[in-house]
């Protein structure tokens, strides 16, 4: 059964050729499945534990997540992207973090000024050779010191009561 969350991230799953060492050109591939989530919080683990939502594949796959989120408080937002292997974060079609390549868990950060309103988010990820799996997306809003897991349910447009 597939559960679709309209306020979450929709990821398309792709199979990769062994020895792929960077994120693929997704438009040249055909998706083999979909995955839905409101947050990316897969801390480092053995590849034998698998990637949540991906069945029968432990290495050589990629996921391209897309979604939207709402910013109520404008300002500078810092993002953290940790992955094993490669990943990239795009906000409104601009690369904010490039953490691509084959590597053990590695964390990169980036920042972007966001206006009040709706914004597009994309997180591209690939799992290369065996050993570890990880994908964590964190955020800290204007004036926030501490990182927290980015969750689309925290970034919803204001509720408009019916008249």
Image: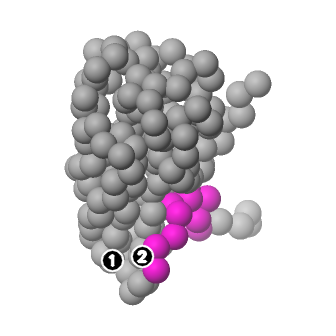
The image shows residue 53 at horizontal and vertical percentages of 62, 32
Which residue is outermost to the front? 131
> Looking at this view, is 133 or 144 the one in front?
133
Residue 45 in the image: x percent, y percent? 55, 46
Q: Quadrant of residue 46?
A: top right
Q: Which residue is mark 2?
A: 141
**Label 1 vs label 2: CA separation?**
8 Å
Helix, strand or loop for the magenta stretch, by majority: loop
Is 120 or 160 nearer to us in this picture? Answer: 120
* Circle 1 Cα neighbour tier, 10 Å, few/some/many (<14 / 14–19 / ≥20): some
**Which residues are the magenta region?**
146-158
Q: Position of residue 106 (x, y in %)?
A: 34, 54
Q: In the image, residue 51 lies at what x, y percent?
A: 57, 35
Can residue 114 be seen at all in this image of the molecule?
no
Q: Is residue 80 magenta?
A: no
Name the residue: 48% across, 41% down: 133
Residue 20 tag number: none
Tell me the residue that label 1 is attached to.
75
Q: Residue furthest right?
A: 1
Q: What residue is rendered at 29% in x and 63% in y?
A: 109
């Amino acid at each position: 059964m597939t559960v679709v969350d309209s306020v979450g991230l929709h990821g398309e799953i792709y199979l990769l050729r062994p020895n792929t060492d960077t994120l693929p050109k997704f438009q040249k591939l055909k998706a083999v499945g979909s995955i839905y989530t409101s947050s990316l919080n897969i801390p480092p683990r053995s590849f034998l534990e698998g990637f949540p939502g991906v069945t029968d594949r432990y290495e050589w796959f990629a996921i391209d997540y897309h979604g939207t989120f709402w910013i109520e408080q404008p300002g500078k937002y810092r993002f953290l992207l940790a992955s094993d292997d490669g990943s990239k974060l795009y906000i409104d079609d601009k690369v904010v973090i490039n953490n691509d390549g084959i590597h053990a868990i590695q964390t990169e950060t980036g920042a972007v000024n966001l206006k009040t309103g709706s914004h597009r988010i994309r997180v591209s990820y690939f799992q290369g050779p065996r050993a570890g799996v990880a994908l964590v997306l964190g955020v800290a809003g204007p004036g926030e010191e501490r990182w927290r897991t980015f969750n689309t349910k925290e970034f919803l447009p204001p509720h408009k009561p019916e008249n």
